[in-house]
Amino acid sequence: MFEIIFLIIICGYFLINTAIITGASKKFSRLNEDELLPVTVIVAARDEESNILRCLKALDSQIYDENKLEIIIADDHSTDGTGKIIDGFIEGKKKFKKIIPGKESGNLRGKANAIASAVKIAAGEIIMTTDADCEANPLWVKTVASYYQKDVGAVNSYTTQQVSGGFSGMQAVDFIYLLAVASGTINISMPVSCIGNNMSYRKNAYNDAGGYENLPFSVTEDSNLLLAINKLKKYKLIFPLDKDALVTSLPCADLKTLFSQKKRWAAGGMGVPIYGAVMMAWALASNLCIFLTPLFFSQVCLYLTFFKLSIDYFLLYFVHKQLGLTKNLRYFLNFELYYTLYVIVLPLALAFNRKVVWKGRKY
């Protein structure tokens, strides 16, 4: 009986992943350089004194018409030396601005409040966001902006992570896996999620969706906004597979921080559309079958486990190759073990405690 259930689940998993890779591989038209729109890059930073300089240097090195580029750093009431580092770096650089977000109120809390404060004064037609621990490719702004055909309301792109061993390697592979799922679903017009450290949208689309002040508060404000723009049925959402739009972030340093990050994402993911919930449930079921295989061991279960791993590897290899990151696949088995465990553990963790702590704040 277990073998039959396992087979049905893996067949469904195969079909879901076929749809994902079909969407993730989709190509999109691009604008000529003289057609590129004004862009505002926004970075919300809180207590990032060890990371912010790396981010600022990468943004300062962007290859883009300086008359069309504005960079706003929202110092989200940092308690360390982040603000002083920002001030020192941007002095004399006209394209940079630093702001301190206003007081939190209503739905404007945490990072959403910081970004909303910056969007209000943004001069660019295109808003691009990244995080203070991220380093953007020099062609990042130019590449992302080139995808803004007239009907496009949001463009999302891939993020990888610095790799120094097995622990960071599994996180890097996991990031690409989650973003491949996001890309595939967005490109078949069934968006589930995105990650705000490499997100962009038209300012008009943001305002039409109501802005963060009018959206329900979420600890994953980026995905919340994406789904709100999608509900308008007015704009096209795309997620190109383009290595020139790649951003590199830093991995979590320890298990405690990693668990906190995953729990925050899982809590935010509870508001996904029904098709997203079905996908998440199917991923849980497939990994649960892998986890239970030693208890119901048979040759059929072994074959199905290998098939499931092959499905994951094929998707990951395709995306990693396009991004020039195939060397990270040496940590594929680390990722699979990690992925299997957290997909099972996180729903249990949320069932008992939905509190999320992020950047010293509780939600």
Image: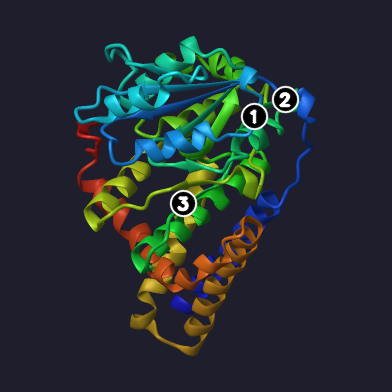
Q: Amino acid at mark 1?
A: Tyr
- Answer whether residue 6 is visible to the viewer in this image: yes
Gap between marks 3 and 1, in whole Å? 39 Å
What amino acid is labelled 3 in the image? Met
For residue 59, above or below residue 175: above
Q: Residue furthest bottom?
A: 299
Which amino acid type is shown beneath numbered disc 2? Leu
Rendered location of residue 355, percent (x, y):
22, 38
| Mark 2, residue position | 36
Q: In this view of the protein, which residue sits in the foreground, 196 or 70? A: 70
Which residue was labeled with disc 1? 64
Other-residue count near label 3 (Cα within 10 Å), few / some / many at <14 / 14–19 / ≥20: some
Which tag is nearer the camera, tag 3 or tag 1?
1
Colour setup of the view: rainbow
Q: Left or right of 237: which side holds 103?
A: left
Left or right, 253 with reference to 240:
left
Residue 322, horizontal then vertical, whole percent: 66, 57
Question: Residue at image x 26%, y 33%?
Answer: 47
Mark 3 highlights which residue? Answer: 280
Horizontal side of 341 relative to 149 (left or right) equals left
Residue 239 position in % (x across, y down): 63, 41
Evaluate whether residue 272 shows in this view.
no
Using the image, determine if residue 343 lies above or below residue 112: below
- Specify the quadrant that holds the N terminus: bottom left
Q: CA distance from mark 3 to mark 2?
A: 37 Å
